[in-house]
Image (cartoon, helix red, strand yellow):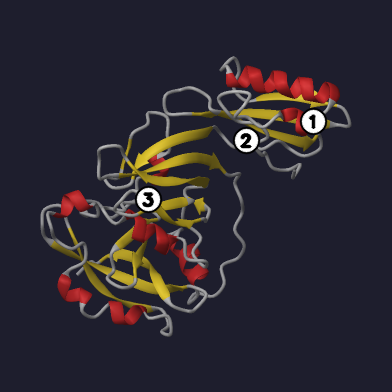
Amino acid sequence: MDPEQPCVLAVGQSQRSAKALTAVLRGPNCKRALDTVSNVANLRTGASEEQLPQDLVLRAEPIVAEDGHVPGVWLGIFGQRVPLPDRGPVLAFRWNVTKGLTESEIGVAERLHMVDYGTDAGAILSVLAAPRYATGFDSVVLDRNEIPHQRFRVRARIDDAVVSGHVSSGSGSTDRFLSGLSIPLPEHVDGPIDGRESHDGLVAQASSRVGVHRAVVRSQDLELLHWYDEPPTGTAWRYRDRRGKSLFNPIDMTSLPSETRPETAMRRGTVRLLHQNGQYQAFHCELKPIPDVENASLATFTVIRRSVA
């Protein structure tokens, strides 16, 4: 167990399904930990801290499900000299990745609402699970018979939160759902920005500019995968807002995909995005491929700015 990071020691709805905490802690420390976990799980306290021998501090935080109950507790043991992280609540959630809507009053919709996987959730999750790409989910892709046939495992960082979970189809529905946990991360300070033409440099510089919108698109057809920021105002980026039209103007589609091949450098150009009024608006864009281990571009990082022309 890493003393600097919380980890799950026991979770379950019954003693039979839970891993015994006694397998990890012994003696008085175990009793204190059990009492702390019990209090937190029964919603008698929020995050709770207990002093342990040898200058250790035990910290327990509830994992709150969408209906308000606590299915598990995060438990961490820290050195007293190490500042305890203020990570915020750990939340359990259920999110409709087909419609881009949350089904949980207590959830992470505010962190995930810039993602719209449409009806192709399984295929797009496989793109996000590319080894060199930092955003994705623990997921199980279901075939047409609702049988899991492929599993992707990768962590996600969205708005300073680690999100993990699995994707499944809802009962009696063709929609797909993402269920899992959101674990806020502590603040960090980025290093100096180097390599303007690199992917990391492009992400870092774009993050500090007003009026700049960062997104990831599928290299094959420029289908939108993920917004890093708020989309341009009025852009019909959700499937339901497009009324059968493409987000990118079809005329632009004939030229831009060829510029996103991994062997090319970052390219700049003009694209037109669909507005909710049905018209296309011009934007300046910068495109940088995200290669996988075989140097094949599954996804492309894009920086978009409204054109003044």
Specify the amino acid type for callout 3: Ile
Specify the amino acid type for callout 1: Leu
Q: CA distance from mark 3 to mark 1?
A: 39 Å
Q: Residue at x 55, y 25 (%)?
A: 13
Q: Nearer the viewer, mark 3 or mark 1?
A: 3
CB atoms of marks 2 and 3 within 8 Å: no
Q: CA distance from mark 2 to mark 3?
A: 40 Å
SS class, disc 2? loop
Q: Dot 2 surroundings within 10 Å: few (below 14), some, or many (20 or more)?
A: few
Which quadrant holds residue 269?
bottom left
Q: Residue at x 25, y 45 (%)?
A: 174
> In the rendered image, which residue does mark 1 sit on?
25
Please state, as top left, top right, bottom left or bottom right, where the C terminus lies in the image: bottom left
Q: Is residue 195 above or below residue 160?
A: below
Q: Residue at x 63, y 24 (%)?
A: 15
> In the rendered image, which residue does mark 3 sit on?
147
Percent of width and height locating residue 73: 61, 29
Closer to us: 33 or 258:
33
User: In this view, which residue lies farthest toward the bottom?
Assistant: 263
> In the rendered image, which residue does mark 2 sit on?
86
Percent of width and height locating residue 190: 59, 58
Q: Which mark is residue 93?
A: none
Specify the amino acid type for callout 2: Asp
- Horizontal side of 17 relative to 227 (left or right) equals right
| Dot placed on the residue nearer the N-terminal end, 3 or 1 | 1
